[in-house]
Structure formats: C-alpha cells, structure tokens
Image (cartoon, rainbow, N blue to C red):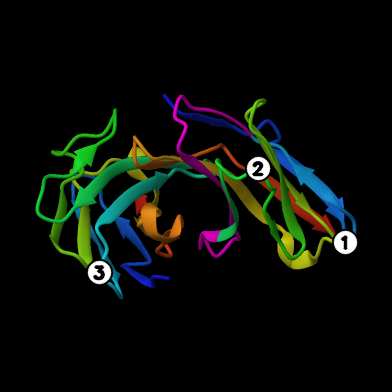
Amino acid sequence: SAVISQKPSRDICQRGTSLTIQCQVDSQVTMMFWYRQQPGQSLTLIATANQGSEATYESGFVIDKFPISRPNLTFSTLTVSNMSPEDSSIYLCSVANYRLNTEAFFGQGTRLTVV
Amino acid sequence: AQTVTQSQPEMSVQEAETVTLSCTYDTSESDYYLFWYKQPPSRQMILVIRQEAYKQQNATENRFSVNFQKAAKSFSLKISDSQLGDAAMYFCALYGGATNKLIFGTGTLLAVQP
C-alpha cells in the first residue's frame, strides 16, 4: 500500500493568482496522477506525471495552466495558474503500479475555492 | 477510447437490506481491470473491490460483491446487509493496460436509511 500526504487540504485564493499543491508518498512509485473533481462530479484525469520526463496531459488540460513537477519518485506538485472561479474544484493526487497490485491510492484532496 | 457509465445518480437503501449499483463500460483492450471506489464526505477515495478482466470468478470482499458480465461489459456492485457507514458516493472505474489510465464513471450517491 501507499500513504499519500497532500497539502494544502483546502485554500481560498484570489482570481489571477496561482496555487501549488504538493503530493508526498511514503514509498517510491513510478506513476503519479493528478485528478480534478468539480463540485458534485466525477474525477477527471488532468495528467500523468512520471519521474524524469514531462507530464502527459489529457485533452482539455495544458501545461501552461497546470504545470506539474516530478523531481523524484516520492514527490510531485501541481500548480493551478492564473486562477478563475471555474478552477474551484477538488484536486487529488493518486499513485498506482497496476502491474504490481492493481490498485490506485489517493491523497485526501485539496479543496480549492477561487474568489 | 475507454468509457464508464453509471446510470443511477442516486440510490437509497434501508439499513440491513441489499442494494445493487450498476456500471457499464466500454474498452477495446483485452487487458483491463475494474474497480469500485467509495468516496465519503471526507473526500478520501477508498477502494471497495476490484476485478481483473481475465478472471471469470466474481470478486467478493465481505459484504461487497460484484456481478461481472464481460460479454455485456457490465460490472455491478452488490452491497449486502447495508450499514449506515456505507452511505457515500460510489465510483466505478476502469483501468486499461495499454492506456495506463484509471477512468471513472459519474458516480452513484448512496443513501442508507435507518
């Protein structure tokens, strides 16, 4: 199993500013994923972050808006840039090694409100 | 493309009764896994049960079991002896080995009535 610490747990931000969300894992993992969960909705994959390479973004998400860092096998950050109220969501970090244990583990999420 | 569909936005069950949550999916892959995740108000995603597509036997975890119909691409979750703590949002999810992504359905909000 993997224990994920995600910070901050919540924040209220002014529009036009940026917020960086941190994800720390208690073990080395190859694959890390960032999801967005808009109010009352499902989880949408933003990007896949592998250590040592550029993140791979899903359709509708771009690096300029959601830059991701993955400096090592236990840590990643997601930045939400130039925020607008539409960015108000829960952002979740996830790790998985489906070949080993076919299970994804999730952080507790960051509730972001943009005013 | 992979898709996951949950047609029941909300369900309700009496405590101690049984409820079934529906999920259908579509994938062109032969190597895939299916999951049910529970998300209580705390937001923490909790794995309820998983099923490997190559296994014919339906997965079971205590009060939770699935009905996996591979040909019909159906993956329903049965919760027996429902408890108040089962109240949560339930997401069906699909992982494809080739795409290496976990895709979620829209969720079913389960209420448990005392």
Q: Which residue type carries mark 3? A: Gln
Provide the secondary structure element on which disc 1 rests: loop
- What chain is tagged by disc 1? B
- On the image, the x and y values in percent for residue A33 come to 31, 51
Residue bearing the label numbered 2: B56
Q: Which residues fall within the magenta stretch?
A: B24-46
Q: What element does badge 3 sit on? A: loop
Foreground disc of the pair 1, 3: 3
Of marks 3 and 2, the one in the foreground: 2
- Determine whether A32 is above or below B73 in the image: below
Of tags 2 and 1, the one toward the viewer is 2
Establish whether labels 1 and 3 are both on one chain: no
Find residue A28 and name its label: 3
Instruction: Give SS at disc 2.
Output: loop
User: Circle 1 is placed at which residue position?
Assistant: B15
Q: Are marks 2 and 1 on the same chain?
A: yes
For the point 65% across and 26% down, the residue is: B71
